[in-house]
Amino acid sequence: MSPPKPIDHGAASKEVRAVFDDIKATRKVDDVNNFWKYLANDPATLRRTWESVKEVMAPGALDPLTKEMIYLAVSVSNGCGYCIASHTAAARKVGMSEAMFGEVMAVVGMANETNRLANGYRVPIDAAFEK
Amino acid sequence: MSPPKPIDHGAASKEVRAVFDDIKATRKVDDVNNFWKYLANDPATLRRTWESVKEVMAPGALDPLTKEMIYLAVSVSNGCGYCIASHTAAARKVGMSEAMFGEVMAVVGMANETNRLANGYRVPIDAAFEK
Amino acid sequence: MSPPKPIDHGAASKEVRAVFDDIKATRKVDDVNNFWKYLANDPATLRRTWESVKEVMAPGALDPLTKEMIYLAVSVSNGCGYCIASHTAAARKVGMSEAMFGEVMAVVGMANETNRLANGYRVPIDAAFEK
Amino acid sequence: MSPPKPIDHGAASKEVRAVFDDIKATRKVDDVNNFWKYLANDPATLRRTWESVKEVMAPGALDPLTKEMIYLAVSVSNGCGYCIASHTAAARKVGMSEAMFGEVMAVVGMANETNRLANGYRVPIDAAFEK
Amino acid sequence: MSPPKPIDHGAASKEVRAVFDDIKATRKVDDVNNFWKYLANDPATLRRTWESVKEVMAPGALDPLTKEMIYLAVSVSNGCGYCIASHTAAARKVGMSEAMFGEVMAVVGMANETNRLANGYRVPIDAAFEK
Amino acid sequence: MSPPKPIDHGAASKEVRAVFDDIKATRKVDDVNNFWKYLANDPATLRRTWESVKEVMAPGALDPLTKEMIYLAVSVSNGCGYCIASHTAAARKVGMSEAMFGEVMAVVGMANETNRLANGYRVPIDAAFEK
């Protein structure tokens, strides 16, 4: 009946250690976050999630700061406490200032408000958006 | 029992017309979107929402494109059909390319996945995020 | 692979008809809404849901109008299209005016905005709320 | 990397103090809640949010108790811990009895259940709701 | 202004005790969980919720393990901390292994990701799903 | 400003065709669903999502029917119209009967109700669930 427990580097299988090592090398950090230590209970999910995050969050048409702020915005909107804490830290690490944080929060709040106003008033999609 | 109906410029009160005119002038458009025509059923909400959106979405520490992509990301995460259509259009208008759209969607998808993995594994917040 | 289909009075089993008849008698209507015709595919869920709704929505410490507006507020917040339409109609039937509808929407919008601001700023609960 | 911190009256700018003073005068309280102390990190969001809340929650077609119960209902549905605590307190302050609280919870629970049944059975909107 | 308090067996009314006794007999446990002790503040909701849970979670076309894993999946998706803890325990009690838990989490994560991709790309329903 | 468009096999790049062909071979179908045709606008997301879905939904500690019912349950809870239609079809294809569908819906409804009751009554986690 016990809740999930973290798996530390010392107790990890070879497969899990390889993922941990890649996270540390990619992010230039000494240890992995709790998120990865808990996912390590399911090595297949650990590996797949890390490979996906690494690919999605790499610089592309959007820079890492923009991506981290979007990740944070979704996490705040969903109310995931762990994710809010970890992605606030991650966004700050790649350059989010206090002022930027405030504006992300303001946009997330506004979007959540107008999303419900659009729902409640049952607003039909403008023809111009469909062309 | 009838559902909400849009209020067009011709049928609008002086108070509503003033808001419509400000939206058109600020956005340099010929007509306001359905969202505003439906909100016009409650002039106080129309005015307050427009004033808030105008303030929040103005350029600040974040540029308008970044703000629109965050707005879109939250709307997609919440599943608001009208908002997805209108903010995809708005983001494209201020410069979101096809590649940027794809990356916004990829980040939104990934955040929604890892938000639930963090919930399900009950991951405690790392001490490093709290300092 | 076909989607769920409604079950009309004529095609209904005796068990389903008894629920339909109780809905019609309780609500003083000639026919039941689509919601009940679809639930009729699972007679146990139809009966249990109707018994629960009948009990919860009966006048008590709160009057039926207040209860219907709360039901509508939650449905708008969740983005359930069917429920928004049906509970807007139900609330109007028991007395929700246009002005009341507008204020319900305004409160729902505001609550969704401040819920996210509280999440994002990780606001700790005031000691005064816990006493 | 540090999480948001509250800003107390003593450390607040003139602009923030003016908002704090208006909240205290409007609500007849000696100090503002944590929510406002955290929002004070972004004075524009603090001011805009307070002005909006003050306008939306003022008596109108709906009385303050009904509005607070709707606010609570949405916060419970969204799972915002801070908001549940603060709006339970706020609703009690304006007259929500234990019995009323119980009925709000019952309606919120029922709405969340039937919202999903309507989704899952893909129930089409009744023609009668659209007239 | 105080938050809800649990009601223990000793302090419970005859009506509440009858529900507690039925829960203990049905589940073969010595005491009821906190969830039921808090719901006991509203005896009608306590009774109705227990009767519904007992009926819905009984073996039927689906076995209890499958039902508990679905309950857990929804609770994780909604981010309800209490429900995640209690339904992880409940699912383990009826046979969910560590490997099964990992696969439930993986499916929940994937569903949350693809739900948003379908929203964002506004994918129309295939004709084949409607036949 | 146009909304996303599907990419059919004939217009697809070599990279996209390879994914389409793998989906068709794995699922033994003549064409891919709209979901994949829309994701094909972003070949990296198409490939990554398909590889993840293929891995997560393969038989493991849970059989494909259980996995599809969990996927459906989450999609219903989130209110994703496309996902509800496609995963109802997918679950039926691997053996979900009408009775099973009804029980999945009943559990999803009940979980959504009790998740909110637990939120609203602020129920603390039982010590027994933490051991």
Image: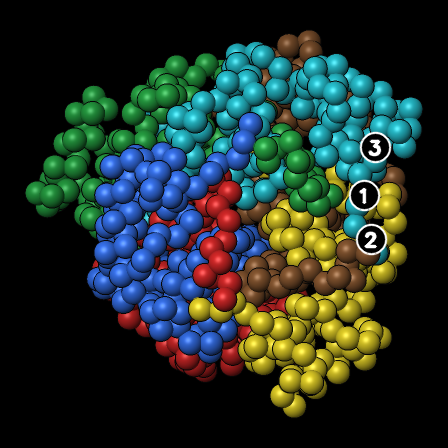
Chain colours: A cyan, B green, C red, D blue, E yellow, F brown
Amino acid type assigned to the residue bearing label 2 in the image: Ser
Q: Quadrant of the C terminus of chain F?
A: bottom right
Q: Position of residue D65 (x, y in %)?
A: 33, 68
Label 1 chain ID: A
Q: Position of residue F4 (x, y in %)?
A: 49, 24
Q: Identify the residue shown where x is 62% and y is 63%.
A: F123
Occupied quadrant, residue D61: bottom left
Amino acid type assigned to the residue bearing label 1 in the image: Lys
Label 3 Cα neighbours within 10 Å, binned few <14 / some 14-19 / many ≥20: some
User: Left or right: C124 with respect to B9?
Assistant: right
Kindly identify which residue carries mark 2. A2
Amino acid type assigned to the residue bearing label 3 in the image: Asp
Q: State the residue in front, E111 or D69.
A: D69
Kindly identify which residue carries mark 3. A8
Q: Position of residue C91 (x, y in %)?
A: 35, 66
Circles 1 and 2, Cβ within 8 Å, touching? The answer is yes
Kindly identify which residue carries mark 1. A5
Q: Which mark is residue E82?
A: none
Q: In terms of secondary structure, where does tag 3 sit?
A: loop
Q: Identify the residue shown where x is 36% and y is 28%.
A: A129
Q: In terms of secondary structure, where does tag 1 sit?
A: loop
Label 2 chain ID: A
Distance, label 3 to label 1, CA atoms, is: 10 Å
